[in-house]
Amino acid sequence: MELAGKRIAVLAENMYQEMELWYPVYRFREAGATVTIVGTGSAKTYTSKVGYPVKVDADVADVRAADFEAVIIPGGYAPDYMRRSKEMVELVRQAAAQGKVVAAICHAGWMLCSADVIRGKRATSYFSIKDDMVHAGAEWVDQEVVRDGNIITSREPADLPAFCREIIATLVREPALAAR
């Protein structure tokens, strides 16, 4: 129960990638964290790329970055919808500014670009958004997981084990980082 007492937000919107949302949700709950699924407010239930539903626990308008030690952004096409929500982008921006762990996998790098939190950071993503990451100021590298300060990124579903291990290790090793 290495994450007992930790509060983690997992962001949701339509067209999310199933594994990139559910794998972290279950892994962090298994480790003892309180996981809150946060939606943009456009619905109470969102569907994945293949139609699998996720019911949100809270709308972004009802939470603050200070409520969590980490914010996790799954990929799929959902990040393109998420970044249309000013409140969702602001949650990510504030979490990063407060030193909270902000973790993005696959196409979720779009949210990091929109929140302007990867300028000058090493990061990775799905290869097709490499240009977006670079134009937002990231030093893009092709690795399964990259941590630069409080920002953690991964490329694709196959990287989920490394992605979750790095998030957990960061929250356990550096609780002051996430508590800021």
Image: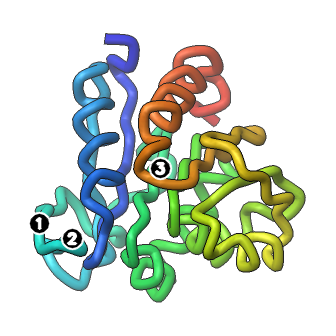
Q: In this image, 80 relative to 1: left or right? A: right
- Give the Cα distance between marks 1 and 2: 5 Å
| C-beta proximity under 8 Å, tags 1 and 2 | yes
Where's residue 160, x and y in %? Answer: 43, 40
Q: Secondary structure at mark 2?
A: loop
| Percent coordinates x, y for residue 45 in the rendering | 12, 72
Q: Is residue 99 visible?
A: no
For label 1, the residue is 52
Q: Secondary structure at mark 1?
A: loop
Left or right: 135 as drawn, with respect to 25:
right
Query: What residue lies at 45% left-to-right and 33% top-to-bottom?
Result: 164
Label 3 vs label 2: CA separation? 19 Å
Q: Are marks 1 and 3 in contact (CB under 8 Å)?
A: no
- Front one among 114 and 146: 146
Tell me the number on the disc at residue 9: none
Q: Quadrant of the C terminus?
A: top right
- Which residue appears at 49% of the width and 42% of the height? 159
Residue annotated with mark 3: 71
Residue position for label 2: 48
On the rendered structure, is 145 left or right of 55?
right
Q: Residue 139: horizontal and vertical position, in percent?
A: 86, 58
Q: Is residue 105 visible?
A: yes
Question: Mark 2: few, some, or many residues within 10 Å (few <14, many ≥20)?
Answer: many
User: Is 19 drawn above or below residue 149 in the view shown?
Assistant: below
Residue drawn at 85 percent across, 69 percent down: 137
* Quarter of the N terminus within the rendering: top left
